Structure formats: C-alpha cells, structure tokens
Image: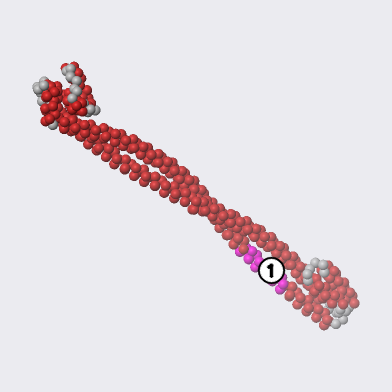
Amino acid sequence: MRTGLLICLILGVLSVELNMERHSEEVLAKLKESKWASFIVDFAEVELGSGGALTELVEAINQLIDQLEEELDDIHQAYSKRTDEHNRDVTRYEQEIQDADRDIFNGEDFIDNVLIPQKQRFQDALAQLKTNIEENRRILDSETVNRKKQHEQFLSNIAEINEAIGAVDESLGLLSQITNPSLVQFKRVQTNLGRIQTSFQNHSSFAPIIKALLELATEQNFADQGSVQQLVKIFNELRVQFVDTLNQETADESAAETKFAERVAQLEKEFAEFQRAVLIKNSEIAANEQKLGETIVYVGQRKDDRATLQAQLQAENDNYASETDLYNRTVTEYNKEIEISKQALGLLTQPSFEQYVKSKVGI
C-alpha cells in the first residue's frame, strides 16, 4: 500500500542522513510500540531538527487518508454493483431452474398420464377393429356359404317341382287318350302310368302324392268315363298346386337373393368403415409415437438445461463467495490503514507531541 511505500522511502532517507540516538525514556518507548508513531517521531525529529515544521507531514497524511477513503468508497461501490449483479444472476438462475423443473414435471406428467394411456387406448381400439374385421369377414363367408346352399336347395326344389309337373302332364296326356274305354286302351294306360310311377317315385319329395294318384289311376278299369274325368280334375288341381309352389319358390329365392345382396352390401360397407378406422387409428398411433418421442427428448433436454443452470448457479455462488472474502479482507486492510493514519494524524496535531519532539532534539 502507499502508506508502507511512503514509510520505506522516509526511513531510507533517515538511515542515510541521520544517526539517531537511542531513546530510553518511557514515553518514547511507548510511542515506539506503534510503527506509525515511531515513523512520525523520527520524521518529526528530522523536520524539527532541520528547522522545518510538521505541516507538510500533516497535509500528506490528510491526503493519504482522503485517498484511502476514496479508494475504499470505490471498493464499496464496486462490491455493491457486483452484489446487485450477483443477486440478479442468482434470481435468474433460480427462476430458470424453476422453469426447467416445471417443464420436466409437466413433460413427465404428460407422458405418464396422457401419452402412454392414450397409446394403450389406441392399440386396444386397433385390436378391436381387427377383431371386427375378422368377424365381418367370417360372417360374410358364412352367409355366402349359406346362400349358396339355399340356392342349391332352390334349384333342387325347382327340379323336383318341374319333374312332378312333368309327371302330372304326362299322366294327363295318357288319361286324355281314353275316349272309348276298351281293354287295349286300359292296359296301355295302366302300363304307361306304372312306368311313370316307377321312374318318378325315387326322385321327388312329391313322389308319395304322385304315387297315390298313379296307383288310383292304375286300379281304375276306366269303364266309367266319369271316373276318368274325376282323375283328370284331380291331376289338374295338383298341377295348379305344383305351379303355385314353383312360383312361390321362385319368389322366395328372389327375395332371399335380394336380402343376401343387401346383407353383403351392409357387410362390405362395415368392412370399408373398419378399414378407414384402422387407417385413422394407425395414423393416431404414429402421431402418438412421434409426440411421445419428442416429449421424451424435450424432457431430457430440460434435465440437461437444469443441470447446466445448477452448475452455473453453484459457480456463481462460489465466485461471489470468493469475491466477498476478498472484499472483506480488502476492506479490513483499508480500514486498518485509515485508522492508523487517523491515529498518526491525531498524534501529530497534539501540541504536547511537538514540544516533546523539540525537547528531544534540543530545540
């Protein structure tokens, strides 16, 4: 410090120019306990012994005190400014750490309570859609098989009905040939009716009815023309029933085919809707996966940010603590020098001190 430099310079001059006497007096010994007092005594002896005064020394010490206090004020101001900067930095770091904590909490909460449950719901919904599609195809295949069987049954029924109608028509044709009953006609009709009965009885569900009528016809002797007409009437009525049945079978088949076509259209519409829903659900799952990945990355980044901020905050606190320690030590040193300077100034301005020094140097 400047005080120490000044002391060294003055003492150096004193050591060259003066050969001071040893002081044994009690007062001087007490003054010598203080380096400043010792210096002032030595300097005062030089000044007064050479006919000078202490005013220059007093002025120099006043200037030194002013300079030290001014420098101390600058130190206080610099530290105050640094403290303000430190407080602002700490507040900013703590706020940014809180922001990172909040972002991390919100991100992890979003992952755990929104994205992951949403992903599970989407996957469950997709699995259900696939089950619905499989069931839709199963129903379509089943109803297609049933429709095929129904149509085959329809064709079989139509064939039997046509076969029955053919047998009735053939029987009516034979019966219409009987105009003047004779043994020859009787035998010929019976033979043909028997042939129809034999060929038809194993090929149609109507065989029992046809068989009964044919047996009845073959048992007739056709001697009575009225009996022949009665048989013709019965065969004609039966033919009408067969034709009605044929028409009803055809109508039922048409209705069944229409109903089946409508059912197929319904199932195909449902199938298309399921497929569209699958596409939508797959896009939702893809979006969920993307959002989940982005959120995981974001949370990781915010954790890195928080760690960096915490390290910066710790470094700032450590630096400020070091600067505060240096500030305290510097202030202590300045205050010490100022106090010593003021003590020295007080010593110099005492009249008794000047008288004491003059007495020592023999003035």
What is the x, y in percent for residue 98?
Answer: 39, 47
What is the x, y in percent for residue 146?
Answer: 69, 62
**In the image: residue 207, left or right of residue 350:** right
Is residue 109 something that shows in the picture?
yes
Q: Amino acid at mark 1?
A: Thr
The residue positioned 74% from the left and 73% from the top of the image is: 242
For the residue pair 196 and 186, the one nearer the viewer reads as: 196
Q: Quadrant of residue 268?
A: bottom right
Instruction: State yes or no: residue 237 in magenta.
Output: no
Quadrant of image for the N terminus: top left
For the residue pair 124 and 164, the one nearer the viewer reads as: 124
Q: Residues within 10 Å of mark 1 (few under 14, many from 20)?
A: some
What is the x, y in percent for residue 228?
Answer: 82, 79
The residue positioned 78% from the left and 79% from the top of the image is: 233
Q: Residue tagged by mark 1? A: 250
Reply above or below: 114 against 257.
above
Reply above or below: 275 against 298.
below
Reply above or below: 349 against 133.
above
**In the image: residue 172, left or right of residue 73:** right
For the residue pair 205 and 197, the one nearer the viewer reads as: 205
Region of the chain picked out in magenta, as a range: 244-262
**In the image: residue 247, left or right of residue 193:** left
- The main secondary structure of the magenta stretch is helix
SS type, badge 1: helix
The residue positioned 62% from the left and 63% from the top of the image is: 263
In the rendered picture of this protein, how many numbered marks are placed on residues?
Answer: 1
Instruction: State yes or no: residue 252 in magenta.
Output: yes
